[in-house]
Image: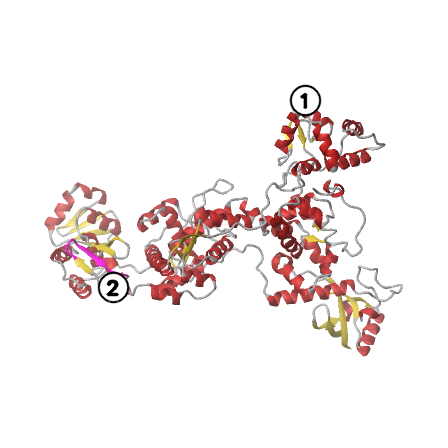
């Protein structure tokens, strides 16, 4: 139980002899390493670099900065801050320990010094252990109120709950509680607080309570502390209300005072504390070689999927929505083309976009298309191609899992849309992989254990459920990408996490590309592995992919053969190609299929007049005119061998092919047009930049420079000057001296090698205080070593507002 003098939440009187009186004093007492630690953990304090310690302390207490700092606390450290928010201000260490341990929880007692050190390092707590103070803004954010309940479940103190209550009513409560009457409400509230924080007298009072009253208190003790009452409450509630054990909050609600709740809880601020993080242990164990092999297979499939996706958009990519992003219809088409779910297709599209392989082409009728980087990427070895994808995935803020959901305004979030960035995604991905890396090689964790650990590490952000969802998506994406295998972190994935190139580890695990296929009599070809680039590209034109896996199955159809002929390949070329790259004889049905399609290919010619059909066989043209399916093409005979059409050439080609013919397009000179359109590419595009989660973490060089600048600025702001003359500055303001006195003082300092304190206004009108050691004064300028900037600088004398000598102990 906390001591009666502190459990009530009333501030102590008196001051410690050595305790700093402000956060600025506490920060000023820190060494450079401690200041660097603060700036590293709270990088927002560096934007811009504070001019001195006072500015740093002020900025560290702003609401936005404190909220951000609280978001990065683990559960027990946050619980420590919450306990300080309901503790007296200042709070002795034993009282804080009692609020968190109840005198019995040894794990919480052992973890408290670490949590308190974290709060100190981040400037959320300051003061000696006998006078711990939570930064005022943090106390305001974490302290309970009717509008914002505290996670502790505690309510207001007696003093807060009785504020505004009539003096007569306060005296009635004091009398009902068995206390002597007082002369004023303040002393009455003090007496009531002393009663509720005295364990023995409080126990005696509760022993008199009806049994039903204890049930009422039991429902409120762990929160929420507010309850509704009727104008004529039941006798147990009336008994509690008359004695101040329940105090009115509004006309129809009562609240359990904090001091009463703490007594009933045994002095605990939280019902359950979490002093140690939930463990993430091995749920399943596999041989590391099996994990790497499985991950390599997934990596190979990922490369094939991304390449197939981007190539499918290189001629006619989907249009960009007016608000940005991909339409639902185009996402469904992409999913069907990849033989995947829409969620999976969304991930692959976003991954290709994050890697800079596709983007909008920037045209008036903007469409998505491959970027020039896609061609360079395809020429890389498979392991290096995978490294590009994995390196883009880990730091990306694009969150494909949100696609299809609605934002706060009810608008649907689209794939590649502008609203899919989530700044927390990279940190969650990296943290999930770090938890996997902490397990033995080949071990995979239980998903719930990973989510519980993340919830402990960032409890404030977890309240929105986004971190848990990001973690679940990370585990799924890492598996399909090949960063993990069977749920365990792979060797290449570990290298990626450690900022090493994963390609050398992945390359030996991937099969070598093959230069042959196995042709079968059922008009299919089996690729026993990944195909080399020229073979794969040509076969993709000549045949359709029927199934994927360890071996890819291609099927030859009349349409696929015609596609190859449209691309400029002759029948003889196709026979030679198959004979060269097949380990089995070319089946006769396949040879017949090629010859049959080639014999009919180009018998009809389509050109642009608006458009026309030309054929030496006038009987065939008559057959087309007689076919009812040609009615929509608007055909009419111009000559025995020529038909004119109202449809465009492309539509005419498609219509005739749908009728079973094999027309070929021709140029204005009568030559057959090769239908292999040039692959469309966007102008050079850079990969999207991840949205930062706040300011970047500063490196050691920046931290060192910032600390020196803050120290120097603090020296200028706090340097002790000699006794000022009549025209000198008032403390806290810029010094004011005449031009002659300014010149004489800096000249004397240059001769003696001493430092002086000056006020200076730069060309932009910004005023500052600086401590300089002049070395040269000439031409209206003074040059000297600036202690504030830690470098030699030159200042115009006409911009110096005044000068003052430093006291002897600060020279």
Please state the extent of the stretch shown in magenta in the rendering: 520-529
How far, Cα to Cα, is label 1 from label 2?
Answer: 90 Å
Of the image marks 1 and 2, the number of the one nearer the N terminus: 1
Residue plotted at (66% across, 45% down) = 103
- Quick one: SS at disc 2? helix
Is 672 on the left or on the right of 107, as rendered?
left
Which residue lies under the disc numbered 2?
A: 535
Kindly give the residue lying farthest to the right in the view shown: 726
Q: Nearer the viewer, residue 158 or 301?
A: 158
Is 247 on the left or on the right of 441, as rendered?
right
Q: Nearer the viewer, residue 89 or 46?
A: 89
| Residue 756 on the magenta span | no
| Residue 521 on the magenta span | yes
Residue 105: where, in percent of width, then height? 62, 46
Residue plotted at (59% across, 42% down) = 272
Quadrant including the C terminus? bottom right
Which residue lies under the disc numbered 1?
A: 235
Q: Nearer the viewer, residue 252 or 451?
A: 451
């Amino acid at each position: 139980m906390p001591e009666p003098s502190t459990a009530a939440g009333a501030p102590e009187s008196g001051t410690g002899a050595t305790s700093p009186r402000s956060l600025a004093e506490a920060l000023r007492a820190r060494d450079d390493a401690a200041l660097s630690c603060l700036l590293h953990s709270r990088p927002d304090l560096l934007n811009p670099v504070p001019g001195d310690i006072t500015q740093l302390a002020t900025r560290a207490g702003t609401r936005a900065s404190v909220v951000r700092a609280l978001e990065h606390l683990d559960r027990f450290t946050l619980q420590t801050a919450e306990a300080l928010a309901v503790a007296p201000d200042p709070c002795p260490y034993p009282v804080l320990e009692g609020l968190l341990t109840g005198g019995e929880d040894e794990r919480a007692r052992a973890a408290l010094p670490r949590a308190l050190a974290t709060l100190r390092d981040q400037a959320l707590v300051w003061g000696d252990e006998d006078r711990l103070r939570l930064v005022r803004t943090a106390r305001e954010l974490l302290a309970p109120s009717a509008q914002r309940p505290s996670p502790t479940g505690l309510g207001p103190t007696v003093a807060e709950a009785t504020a505004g209550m009539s003096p007569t009513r306060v005296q009635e409560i004091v009398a009902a509680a068995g206390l002597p009457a007082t002369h004023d409400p303040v002393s009455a509230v003090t007496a009531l607080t002393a009663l509720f924080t005295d364990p023995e007298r409080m126990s005696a009072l509760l022993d008199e309570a009806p049994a039903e009253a204890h049930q009422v208190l039991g429902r409120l003790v762990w929160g929420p502390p507010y309850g509704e009452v009727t104008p004529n409450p039941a006798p147990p509630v009336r008994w509690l209300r008359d004695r101040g054990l329940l105090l009115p909050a509004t006309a129809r609600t009562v609240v359990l005072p904090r001091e009463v709740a703490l007594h009933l809880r045994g002095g605990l601020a939280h019902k359950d504390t979490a002093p140690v993080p939930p463990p993430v242990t091995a749920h399943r164990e596999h041989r590391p070689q099996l994990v790497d092999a499985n991950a390599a297979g997934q990596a190979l499939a990922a490369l094939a999927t991304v390449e197939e996706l981007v190539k499918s958009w290189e001629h006619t990519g989907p249009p960009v929505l007016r608000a940005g992003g991909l339409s639902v219809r185009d996402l469904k088409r992409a999913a069907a083309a990849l033989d995947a779910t829409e969620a999976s297709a969304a991930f692959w599209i976003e991954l290709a976009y994050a890697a800079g392989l596709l983007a909008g082409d920037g045209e008036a009728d903007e469409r998505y298309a491959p970027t020039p980087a896609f061609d360079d990427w395809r020429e890389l070895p498979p392991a290096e191609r995978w490294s590009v994808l994995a390196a883009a995935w880990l730091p990306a803020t694009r969150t494909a899992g949100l696609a299809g959901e609605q934002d706060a305004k009810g608008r649907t979030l689209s794939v590649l849309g502008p609203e899919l960035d989530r700044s927390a995604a990279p940190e969650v991905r990296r943290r999930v992989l770090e938890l996997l890396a902490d397990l033995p090689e080949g071990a995979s964790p239980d998903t719930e254990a990973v989510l519980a650990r993340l919830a402990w590490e960032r409890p404030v952000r977890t309240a929105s459920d986004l971190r848990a969802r990001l973690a679940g998506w990370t585990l799924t994406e890492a598996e399909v990408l090949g960063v993990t295998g069977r749920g365990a972190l792979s060797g290449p994935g570990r290298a990626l996490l450690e900022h090493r190139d994963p390609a050398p580890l992945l390359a030996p695990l991937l099969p070598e590309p093959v230069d042959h296929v196995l042709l079968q009599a059922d008009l299919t070809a089996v690729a026993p592995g990944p195909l080399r680039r020229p073979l794969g590209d040509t076969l993709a034109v000549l045949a359709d992919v029927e199934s994927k896996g360890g071996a890819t199955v291609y099927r030859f159809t009349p349409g696929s053969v015609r596609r190859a002929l449209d691309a400029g390949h002759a029948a003889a070329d196709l026979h030679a190609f198959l004979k060269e790259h097949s380990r089995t004889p070319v089946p006769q049905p396949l040879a017949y299929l090629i010859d049959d399609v080639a014999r009919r290919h180009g018998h009809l010619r389509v050109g642009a007049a608006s458009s026309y059909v030309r054929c030496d066989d006038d009987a065939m043209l008559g057959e087309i005119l007689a076919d009812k399916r040609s009615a929509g093409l608007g055909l009419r005979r111009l000559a025995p061998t020529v038909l004119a059409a109202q449809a465009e050439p492309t539509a005419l080609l498609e219509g005739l092919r749908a009728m079973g013919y094999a027309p070929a397009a021709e140029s204005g000179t009568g030559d057959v047009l090769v239908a292999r359109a040039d692959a469309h590419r966007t102008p050079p595009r850079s990969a999207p930049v991840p949205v930062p989660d706040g300011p970047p973490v500063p490196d050691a060089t920046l931290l060192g420079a910032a600390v020196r600048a803050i120290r120097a600025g603090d020296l200028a702001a706090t340097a002790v000057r000699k006794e000022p003359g009549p025209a000198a500055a008032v403390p806290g303001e810029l010094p004011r001296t005449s031009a002659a006195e300014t010149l004489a003082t800096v000249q004397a300092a240059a001769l003696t090698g001493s430092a002086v304190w000056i006020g200076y206004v730069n060309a932009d009108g910004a005023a500052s205080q600086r401590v300089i050691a002049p070395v040269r004064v000439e031409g209206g300028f003074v040059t000297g070593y600036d202690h504030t900037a830690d470098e030699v600088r030159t200042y115009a004398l006409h911009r110096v507002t005044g000068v003052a000598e430093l006291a002897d102990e600060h020279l």
